Structures are given as structure tokens and as C-alpha cells.
Amino acid sequence: MNLHEYQAKQVLREYGVATPRGVAIESASQAEGAIAELGGDAWVVKAQIHAGGRGKAGGVKLVKSRGALLEAVNALLGKQLVTYQNAPEGQMVSRLLIEETLPIARELYLSLTVDRESERIVLVASGSGGMEIEEIAQTSPEKILRETCDTLWGLQDFQCRALAFGLGLEGSQIGEFGKLTKGLYKLFKDNDLAMVEINPLIVTATGSLVALDCKIGVDDNALYRRKKLAEMSDSTQIDSKEVAAKEFDLNYIALAGNIGCMVNGAGLAMATMDLIKLHGGQPANFLDVGGGATADTVAKAFKIILSDANVKAILVNIFGGIMRCDIIAEGIITAVKEVGVKVPVIVRLEGTNVELGQKMLAESGVGVISASDLTDAAKRAVAAVK
């Protein structure tokens, strides 16, 4: 689960991390109150959506007058903002964060995440703040600094100092950086976070460290014990199909293609999407129905896939182990009849009771296209949409 920037900064402040003063608004009528509260004669207006690349997409505006601020607010609120990280139709801007401006001397990058290879929390820093970390990793990997935190002892003072020196911080900034990183580590552990990223972490003209922008991602598996954070969830920023899938315990991620995929097992789902791409198609989604799905679950999965108007064909790829092929066949038949599927459905079954499942599909009269293997299924699906 992701937090909005204004929410993330609220959490940062609770752990002693300095942020610019700001006011979150949900309507243009609240802009005047924000101006009065912040004062000054220049502000930054930031669209609050769960996607990066807002600045390049026009979602972050520096304004230097009251009129310009009101114009920016009206231009962003209630509009779809399209960035390189979100869906083609973008995401609705329902909130804005209006912040004071600060004099910037330097921009740094700082983040905490889980390194799955070492099974440790890792602190990542760079002197190239304000840029995408992926771009830095590709063009200048030597600029990325890392400190891996010990599971038992956590983040140590010498690691904070090593990063501070590596970033070229001096004097009191070294101690301030150590306090900041220790606070971030505690925040990360206390709240079961998956990621916290400050980009940029600025050094102001007076030498202070301030988190100018922040992203926080919470581990969904821990939300049951992080009630306060769970209440910050904004379902309007999540694809409606993903919200519906979560209600049925289905693992669904919307993509931009036109071939709907229903698979059991994450690895098999990835392989299915790879083969679709290999043969010239575009998957419309990732959907793992899991190993214990029932006929009812399969029917619900079909409805979610078909709620995407871009879907022109559906590829069902099931390996029957825990979930028997006849159960899957029953679910497919039920779904096709209930929903009234108007697009080609290509089915590849393998495993337990595969012959029975194939027989049920063949005798159902619902017009399902049976594939002999996964490659055949991918080719048939691509051909169906072309």
C-alpha cells in the first residue's frame, strides 16, 4: 500500500525528519486558507497521486503569485494526470499539496528498502538527488552508496557516518544526517514498511537537511496490525479491477494490453505473459488465481478480466495440481454462460484430471478454443486479437 506525499511527510515528522511546511487541499476553495497559513509570496503546488514522474508530467508547479497558485490549483484538481509510471488514462488528482519554497544548495537521494538477496534492510544514498535512481544506476553506478543493516544490531552510527562522508556532508550536517537516518530506520521497522524514499533530500542554503519529497510503501501483509496506516489507503488511486480482485483474494495487476490472462501460479503467469509478448501480443493483466481456487473464484476472475474494455481475447493457462482441471473447466463454463463472453477464450489445461476437464469444455457448447500446449495457446491468443 502506498501513501500520498502529504501523508508520508506527516509520518516523517513524527520521527523527527524535517519537511517543508505544507497544506493538503481537496478543493479550490481551500487554496486561500493554505496561502494564509503558509504566508510568503511563492509556493509549490503538487498533485497527489500514487505515481512517480509527476514533475515531468506537469503535476508539480512552482508559482510566484496568488493568481498563479489559484490557476495551478484549478488546472490540476479533478484532472487525470498521466505519467510514465501510471496507466495510459492516468490517475485522478483529488488532492493537492501546497508547500512553502526553500533555498536549495544541494539535492541528495536517500531510501530504505528490503534487499531480498541479503534478506536485510538496506540504506541507499546518492549525491545525485532529484534524478530517477534507476537512471543513476545505469549511467553512473559508482554514485550509488549502500549500507546493509544487520538484522540484530540494526543501522549503526559508523554506517551513517560512512554515508555522510560519501555524500560530502560536513560539520554539523554529519550528526544531523545520522539522526535523520536513524529516525528513518526506526520508522521503517516500526511500521513494517516495504520502502521509504526521499528524493530529493535537500541541503538548504543554511546547511539544514530537509525531505523535499517522500514516498512510503507499506507491506500489505502487515496492514492488519498497522491500522493507522491502513486508514490512509486511497482506493481511488488503485485500478478498480485490482480493488475487486483483492476482495476475492485474487492477485491481479492491470496492464495496457488486450489479451486477458488467467493463470494459477505467479511463475506460470509470468511465463505466460512472456510467451504472449514473444509471439507479438500484449497481455492485458497479470492474474494469479492461486492453487486453491474454486469454480466460483474462476467465474469471478473472468468477470474482472472482462471488465477491462481493452480485452479482445482471454488466455486461460492452468496447471492442475492442487486445483484440478475439471474444477477449472467447470468455472470457465459457468463464467462464459453467466457473463456472456463475446471474445475468444483460449484454454490450455495440464495436470490432474486434464482429460476430464478437456472433455467438459468440448461438450459444453460454449465455444472455448482448446490449445495443446502453452506455445500453441499463446499463438492462438495473439492470432485471435489480430
Image (spheres, rainbow, N blue to C red):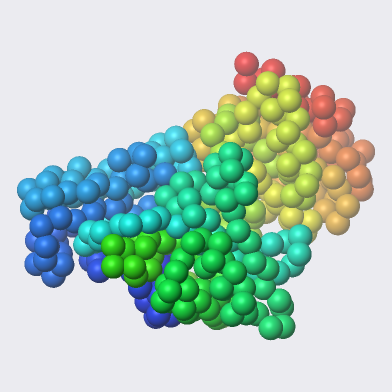
Residue 358 sits in quarter: top right
Residue 245 sits in quarter: bottom right
**Relative depth, front residue between 327 and 258:** 258
Question: How many numbered marks does the figure carry?
Answer: 0
Could you tell me which residue is drawn at 69 percent across and 42 percent down? Answer: 262
Residue 29 visible? no
**Relative depth, front residue between 374 and 226:** 226
Q: Quick check: 245 left or right of 101?
A: right
Q: Percent position (x, y) of residue 338?
A: 60, 42
Residue 62 visible? yes
Q: Quick check: 10 left or right of 157?
A: left
Q: Quick check: 78 left or right of 296?
A: left
Could you tell me which residue is drawn at 76 percent across and 60 percent down? Answer: 117
**Relative depth, front residue between 127 and 244:** 127
Name the outermost residue toward the bottom. Answer: 153
Q: Which quadrant: the C terminus?
A: top right
Q: Percent position (x, y) of residue 69?
A: 14, 50
Could you tell me which residue is drawn at 74 percent across and 67 percent down? Answer: 119
Q: Quick check: 288 left or right of 268?
A: left
